[in-house]
Amino acid sequence: MKVFTQFISAFILLCSFSTLAFTPTASQIEQFKKLPKAQQEALAKQYGVDVSTITGTNQSNNQNNTEQQNSIGERAEPEKEKLTDEERFKPKADELKPYGYELFAGEPTTFMPSENAAVPDTYIVGPGDQLKINFYGKESDSFEVIVDREGRISIPDLSPVEVAGLTFAEIKELIKVKVEQEVIGVKAFISLGQLRSMRILVLGEAYKPGSYSVSSLTTVSHALFVSGGVSDIASLRNIQVKRAGNVVANFDLYDLLINGDSSNDIVLKSGDAVFIPSVGAQVRVEGAVKRPAIFELKKGESAKQLLAMAGGLKPNAYAKSAIVERFNFDRKEVLSVDFSKPQINYIPQDGDRIRFNSVSSQYQNSVSLIGAVARPGNYQWHQGKRISDVLKSVRGDLLPQADLSYGLVIREININGDIEAHQFDVAQAIIKNPENNLQLQANDKIVVFSRFEEKEAELSALANMALSQEQQEQQLKAEQWHKFEQKEFEKYIGVNQEDEELVLEDNKILTIAEISKRKAKEEEDQELKPEDYALFSRHNLLAPIIAKFKQQASVQQAMQLVEISGNVTFPGIYPLMIGGEVSDLITAAGGLLESAYIKQAEITRIVASDGSKIEHLRFDLESAMKGDLQSNITLQSKDSINVFAIPNWQENVKVELKGELKFPGTYTIRRGETLTELLERAGGFSKFAEQKAAVFTRTSIKEQEQKQLARLSTELRRDIASKSFQNSVSSSTLSYEEMNKLLNDLASVEAVGRLVIDLPLIVNNQQNLVLQDGDTLYVPSKRDSISVIGEVNYSTSHLYKTGVSVDDYLALSGGLKERAAEDRIYIIKANGSVKIPNTGGWFAANNADQLEPGDTIVIPMDAGHMDKLTLWSTATQILYQLGVAVAAIGSL
């Protein structure tokens, strides 16, 4: 009932206030305020009354009650000047910015103060502040009272209380005591509501200087934000707070930003002026510091204080020699300052630029592990350290594909970065064999190679090893690290493989330069591309080492490279190791092949005393490999070893026989064996064999034919393009589709490699054919057909009949097309040979005598329909002949 009465009273108050200009009493307003906010707004809306006129708050105060959002907006970027091409493309250094300025990223969009901050007990209450008082105990009630201009508050049923100038803590205690004294059984709880606003000035180098209405809790830093921050030439270290013309505080923003010290960030009072002077002395600190920037200095600040502002040095900073650039009156000078000492002999000055460089990226007192190892990288070096201290286990420290017989230690020998190579046996070094377990020196590089040269062979071998998941991951990590370590190794020895290759000349004799050219040609002849080599192959790992040896060669220092060719696993150019002998180079090349002739080998050597001469040294290879002092010759610069093949050596040479033979199949032959001898081994022919139609193919001829086809296709396309520019193709009787079809046929056709033979003559020993590896003989069964192809209306095969002429078979094929070349018709015999019919007229009776079962009649195209493209005739003829051969083989 009480709530209903309050509601009616509020309603009457609203009506009377809006229509009769009646002024409600304070108690009536308090009763209206006790209604829920939703009811207040509903009644106000229903009767068209502004709630603020009842509650005593205006629109601006309502806005003050809302949370301030986005008080700082983005600053408008200054228009960029148009740059010249030189300015746009000229490399720019990293631009340093003054420290602390980025804190003020925008400009003010509203000047409303924040009201959500916690109020400290030391807050001094003044006119306009709102206090919220809650009674509890015998009576429960709540009041919101505002400090009037005289500094008093009026609490219902209590006498006025003087609060102006008191702290919030003092007011709380004062009201509690007063309530306990004047109202029995009631206690009070006091809090601050809406705070008063006040006017302050932000002047000087503010981004938006002027007068601002702010909260009574506003501090110096908040005033800076309200004004949008500072200008580009403002001081952050000497911000002054002036009150009644006197400086009452100096605020250093660095204390707050760097040290988190807010002791000087005082609360402002109404009428205070925040003055921002221009920036003082500035010093640039850049390079290997944690906080590179432009710092403002106060008078008397030391180098250590400046370094502290920059956050200190990074671990990679070279503190012993910081570079200081300084303007000294009419000139600019450079100072070197040691920042590693406790006492730094340097006083920063305005305009100084301090640059801390990084220490060298080269490792000191370390050894590096490169190649087919499980954990590549850098390891600590100490006096007396050996290879076995780094590589302790074959299974634990090496990858599965590692070559256990060949490794290198690359060592710097002088201040110029020149290197030398030391060879060792990896497996022997691991088991601590003194001869191979070399003692290491600081910055040595240990290189372990793969025993495979080609990536495909290596992957195949690894697949057969059935590696575990952990081993596969280890393999991948090692490969990824190697790509990085290889670049570091190239930097270490001062060589970049992407740079131009070094070519050395040596008086037109057999030099390493010529060897390199020959090697390049051999690699070009091979179809192995750089990406086809195994990652840890000799080709990849030796390339930068060889390039370095070429680079450091001079008149005083001969090029420390040697070459090995012939019957070894990995022929090529290798570093000449210290004291290297013949057996060492053969080991480096992967050892001897099965075909190697071990009784004798040869060294080609440039005579040191006379560079225009060379000599050839023969030695016993078998004795050299056993370590015989006389045969195991010590190698010299540019020596070239040639390992001969065993005389008449041959690998397994195989020839295939197919078709109508008693025992067809694949046969291994001896060197020099003939086709007649092989046919005897195969038991001869079956009774269905058609010897005259035999097709014999050879791998070398097939490769040659394939190159010819590719060249012909290229020339034909070029010829067509040339004729089209002369507008001759447009008048062609050949359609574009026909020309394109022929080009596509040439591009896609696969060569057969047919060698035309007369098998009956060979069988009867009237001709001799020596076999080669990869040869194939196809013997078809007897045939009883004649084929007609080319420019006829219907290309097909016909049953062979004795006495039927070429003209008869052409008639059976529908006759010739308009563009057929009648005077150029030829016959492809069953054995692959070509014959031209007798010219007593195409239709002479004796033409029938020239035809045999299995023959093919070819009618080429008339040259007048070829637009003078002379290659058309060649192309079509090749296609016809290939078609006949393929058909013969396909019939088996």
Image (cartoon, grey):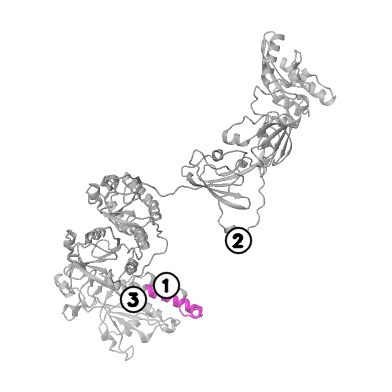
Q: On residue 85, which mark appears?
A: 2
Task: Name the one closer to the observer, 324 or 61.
Answer: 324
- From where the camera sits, is residue 625 visible? yes
Residue 691 highlighted magenta (yes or no)? no
Q: Amino acid at mark 3?
A: Thr
Find residue 834 and report its image quarter.
bottom left
Residue ranking furthest to the bottom? 840
Residue 15, given in percent of the width and then of the height, sits at 81, 24
Circle count: 3
Check disc 3 and report the residue beneath it: 796
> Along the horizontal axis of the image, is 43 left or right of 136?
right
Q: Look at the picture and state if 858 lies above or below 127.
A: below
Q: Nearer the viewer, mark 2 or mark 3?
A: 2
Residue 421, given in percent of the width and then of the height, sits at 30, 56
Per the image, label 2 sits on a secondary structure element best described as helix
Between the C-alphas of marks 1 and 3, the distance is 20 Å
> Along the horizontal axis of the image, is 647 left or right of 180?
left
Residue 311, given in percent of the width and then of the height, sits at 53, 39
Q: Amino acid at mark 1?
A: Lys
Check disc 1 and report the residue beneath it: 741
Disc on the earlier residue, 1 or 3: 1
Disc on the earlier residue, 2 or 3: 2
